[in-house]
Image (cartoon, rainbow, N blue to C red):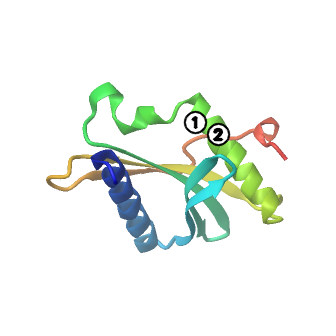
């Protein structure tokens, strides 16, 4: 059985995917399991491979969606992206890390914020 929290998360990802498509992104993967983790969305935008973390919050309690991406989560996303690139022979592919924040309730229109290149990755962060 799906919990209300899981339903909200799924709705947030669907909204993010639809918004990205309208902006010209080509969605390559959604909810891709890599080892023990999951990448929310992987998209192509022009010549850039984009790894997108989607965070939805019903309220801004505890800082809302922006505070859901901490240092541990960034490391996990980088590790999963490294695995994806290695598995697909894309170690020379230019890529970036975006975050889409969805704030709102199930009533009314949620607010979507797209943070392009939400965090930087140094060469020492990659785990080949």
Left or right for 64, reference 51 = left
Mark 1: secondary structure: helix
Residue 122 location (% of width, % of height): 75, 38
**Picture quadrant of residue 58:** top left
Q: What residue does disc 1 label?
A: 73
Mark 2 surroundings within 10 Å by alpha-carbon count, few (fewer than 14), some (14 through 19), many (20 or more): some
Q: Identify the residue at horizontal 71%, vertical 43% (top origin).
A: 79
Given residues 71 and 3, the one toward you in this image is 3
Q: Identify the residue at horizontal 41%, vertical 58% (top origin).
A: 13
Q: Identify the residue at horizontal 27%, vertical 29% (top origin).
A: 61
Spatial CA span between label 2 and label 1: 5 Å
Q: Identify the residue at horizontal 66%, vertical 36% (top origin).
A: 75
Q: What residue does disc 2 label?
A: 76
Furthest toward the front, the residue is 1
Furthest toward the left, the residue is 107
Residue 32 location (% of width, % of height): 59, 60
**Picture quadrant of residue 7:** bottom left
Decide: marks 2, 1 in contact (CB < 8 A)? yes
The answer to whether residue 23 is seen in the rendering is: yes
Total numbered circles = 2
Left or right for 6, reference 127 = left
Q: Is residue 67 above or below residue 1?
A: above
Residue 24 location (% of width, % of height): 49, 73
């Amino acid at each position: 059985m799906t919990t209300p929290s899981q339903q909200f998360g799924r709705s947030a990802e669907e909204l993010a995917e639809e918004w990205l498509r309208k902006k010209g992104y080509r969605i390559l993967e959604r909810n891709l399991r890599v080892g023990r983790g999951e990448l929310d969305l992987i998209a192509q935008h022009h010549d850039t491979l984009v790894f997108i973390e989607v965070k939805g919050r019903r309220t801004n309690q505890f800082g809302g969606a922006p505070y859901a991406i901490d240092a541990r989560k960034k490391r996990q996303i980088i590790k999963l992206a490294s695995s994806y690139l290695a598995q697909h022979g894309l170690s020379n592919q230019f890529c970036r890390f975006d975050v889409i924040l969805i704030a709102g309730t199930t009533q009314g229109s949620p607010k979507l914020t797209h943070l392009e290149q939400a965090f930087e990755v140094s060469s020492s962060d990659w785990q080949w």
